[in-house]
Amino acid sequence: MTIGDPLELPPTMLPNSCDIFLEAVNAAVTIEEPADVANTLLQITTAMFDAGNDEYAYALLQKTFRRIQELDDPKERAYLLRLFVTLQCRQGLIDAAVETLPLIDDPEQRAIALKESAIWQALAGRPNDALKTADAIEDLDDYEEVLVAVGIKQAEQGLVSEAEATAEKIESEELRIRLLRNIAGENIDVEETNKTIESAREIDDLFHRSTALREIGITLHQNGKATEALAVFKETLNTVQRIRNTYSRTVALTEFADRLVSVGNDVVAIKVFRLAVTTAQEIDDVDFAVPCLCKIAGAQATTKLFDEALDTVKVVEELRNEIHWKSPERGPLDRDLAAVIGKLAVALEDSVEEEESIPLFQKALDIAHNIADAQCRAVALMRLACASGDS
């Protein structure tokens, strides 16, 4: 296969993800800026793990690490090392991630990496190690996020009194509510829930308030309290619609709809998704609007709302056609468009809609192959490879 040539797909199958990953890697090494090369290779490595190509991923992991260490700019190196720590944690290489921490010499990036490592230690059932790592965290909000992770793990291990004691140490209303909701689990108490709702209403930031309310509603729904859940969902939606920033409101609506689908409330989810699409179209900057719309379409595809996803893709394509073919703005736009069309094609194939999925995936590949910017092309191919690897 010649890199960059369109793939000829057999009539009844999607392409092998390894072939597309190879294209992505070859595109990445043609990028001019060393930091962009390292960043793109890091994304491809992450995607390889996500797609289950562990053998290739581990081989690329070390090469990516060396590329990052070779960077001259200390800020770029610190930023990418922080992302590398995240990748290590996600793959269960937590001790290796802790060993990477001293290599990050930028205080801001090291703080983020410390929080990330501590949270993963907690989730891995190592709360004492998590708290030890967290001792080096200076930001209170970051430290309290670690406490939430520690408390959740304590509750999962049956250490309810210890988890409740951890919750008492948390000053943030939103974070404390998140932990208490997890501690309650299936033993949710209506009176306690009402107190939690009142606490959520005291959160000043509307985005965070809506998140807290949404998750309370989800917990109620999961515990068979449909009427109470519906009331909280309505309050959540009203709170979201009061968010003044259009981008933030779009993100909140998308996340809300996605969570509604996760608990089987498709009817309301469709309405919220449509609100999200309408709101995203009100975002002035296309650089923000398109990723939002693609995220919505991706969520709709994943949740098998195919007609809704196809309608959202049409909106993206209309925006795409408004931008001149040779405009440098097209790179990121086509990257996101190719990714979401590929994801939709795979979701359709999983639902035995092969006649639609195969040409749709070919369309996604064609868009990716025609992206002039090497970094955007590499990332688009990487995302398509990850999608086809899940098929």
Image (cartoon, rainbow, N blue to C red):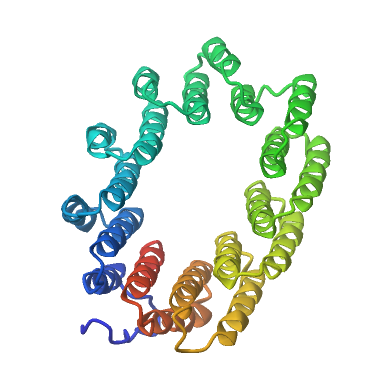
Q: Give the number of callouts.
A: 0
- For residue 38, which quarter of the picture? bottom left
- For residue 178, which quarter of the picture? top right
Say left or right for 16 vs 120.
left
Say left or right for 315 vs 78.
right
Residue 327 vs 77, above or below: the answer is below
Residue drawn at x 81%, y 42% is 235
Q: Nearer the viewer, residue 3 or 131?
A: 131
Image quadrant where one finds the C terminus: bottom left
Coordinates of residue 348 in the picture (x, y in percent)? 53, 71
Coordinates of residue 101 in the picture (x, y in percent)? 27, 35
Residue 86 vs 369, above or below: the answer is above
Coordinates of residue 294 in the picture (x, y in percent)? 56, 67
Residue 360 vs 73, above or below: the answer is below
Coordinates of residue 198 in the picture (x, y in percent)? 79, 27
Residue 244 vs 384, above or below: the answer is above
Q: Nearer the viewer, residue 201 or 232?
A: 201
Say left or right for 233 vs 365.
right
- For residue 125, which quarter of the picture? top left
Residue drawn at x 53%, y 68% is 351
Q: Nearer the viewer, residue 175 or 218?
A: 175
Image quadrant where one finds the N terminus: bottom left
